[in-house]
Image (spheres, rainbow, N blue to C red):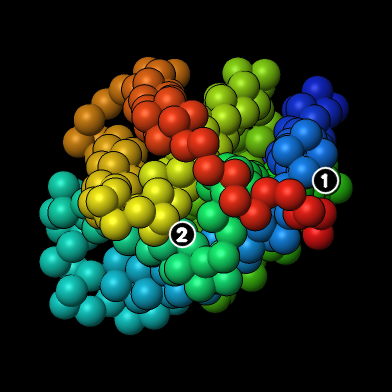
């Protein structure tokens, strides 16, 4: 099968996307550290906690339960039951990140960050968590897109397809579809990706504030399960769109998620962060 070559315009857009998704989160973290004299290690904790809870712990369990075939594993009764029910599938897909990521925040605040009580810690953690997600998910994804594009243009992409057909035939159709998407990649596609990550980043900072105060003050402990519920609903809603239970355009979905993320962020910021006058431990934080 011949693949349509990826144009220079498409590759340029992917390069721009890669730079944005890999560099901008680091710039945000540096600016925040300088302006607030915050410990950069708090940002690092946010990033490492996301890596541990969302990638190392969450993904393998979710893949075995929901996506065994895609992972080259044998299908089992639970996966057949879940995949046969789109609404349940969407709920499970949303529940995993909701539980693991919010619990990751909770554990981090209660352990390695337990002595950092100044309110800036919440945003520092959120920058690390949300920023690293951007870098890992879209930064590396766009690097892969560029690599595939170059292989398509040089005629070596067929080798990848042949390997996939031999090892995981069910994923071959996905690669065929991806090759077509790369050839038609547009400014609109890049813009959607950027808006999606801005929305996600905003949510992660807001959720980090919520869970921070759930750990800081017992009267706010209920914010931790609330963060799980909100995260589950948002990702579950996206799951419903993936299985066509609901049909909305990409921009309509981003508008809905943008409103929800803004509500979480600004609600947490003005109701909790801005009202907190405690700056214990803020001075001298330079690491």
Q: Residue at x 29, y 72 (%)?
A: 65
As helix, strand or loop, the secondary structure at mark 1 comes to helix
Residue 254 picture location, percent across and down: 43, 24
Residue 185 picture location, percent across and down: 65, 28
- Say which residue label 1 marks: 150
For the residues labelled 1 and 2, the Cα–Cα distance comes to: 39 Å
Side (left or right) of 101 relative to 185:
left
**Residue 41 tag number:** none
**Foreground tag (1 vs 2):** 2
Instruction: Assess disc 2: are there few (<14), some (14-19) or many (≥20) residues with their C-alpha within 10 Å of its C-alpha.
Output: many
Specify which label sits upstream in the sequence, 1 or 2.
2
Q: Residue at x 76, y 27 (%)?
A: 13
**Could one spot residue 261 in this view of the protein?**
no
As helix, strand or loop, the secondary structure at mark 2 comes to helix
Side (left or right) of 250 relative to 36:
left
**Front residue (pair 186, 48):** 48
Quick check: 34 above or below 157? above
- Say which residue label 2 marks: 105
Q: Quadrant of residue 145?
A: top right
**Front residue (pair 131, 109):** 109
């Amino acid at each position: 099968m011949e693949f349509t070559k990826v144009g220079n315009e498409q590759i340029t857009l992917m390069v721009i996307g890669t730079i944005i998704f890999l560099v901008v989160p680091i710039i945000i973290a540096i600016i925040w550290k300088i302006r607030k004299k915050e410990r950069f290690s708090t940002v690092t904790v946010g990033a490492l906690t996301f890596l541990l809870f969302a990638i190392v712990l969450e993904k393998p369990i979710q893949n075995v339960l929901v996506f065994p075939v895609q992972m080259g594993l044998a299908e089992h009764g639970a996966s057949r039951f879940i995949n046969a029910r789109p609404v349940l599938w969407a709920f499970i897909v949303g529940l995993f990140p909701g539980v693991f990521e919010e619990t990751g925040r909770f554990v981090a605040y209660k352990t390695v960050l337990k002595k950092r009580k100044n309110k800036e810690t919440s945003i520092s953690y959120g920058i690390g968590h949300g920023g690293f997600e951007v870098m890992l998910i879209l930064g590396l994804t766009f690097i892969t897109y560029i690599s595939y594009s170059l292989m398509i243009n040089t005629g070596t992409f067929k080798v990848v397809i042949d390997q996939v057909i031999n090892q995981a035939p069910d994923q071959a159709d996905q690669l065929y579809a991806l090759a077509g998407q790369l050839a038609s990649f547009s400014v609109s596609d890049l813009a959607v990706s950027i808006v999606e990550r801005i929305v996600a980043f905003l949510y992660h900072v807001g959720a980090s504030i919520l869970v921070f105060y759930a750990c800081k003050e017992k009267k706010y402990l209920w914010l931790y399960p609330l963060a799980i519920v909100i995260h589950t609903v948002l990702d579950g809603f996206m799951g419903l769109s993936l299985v066509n239970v609901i049909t909305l355009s990409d921009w309509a979905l981003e508008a809905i998620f943008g409103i929800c993320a803004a509500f979480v962020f600004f609600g947490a910021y003005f109701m909790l962060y801005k009202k907190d006058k405690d700056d214990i431990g803020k001075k001298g934080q330079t690491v």
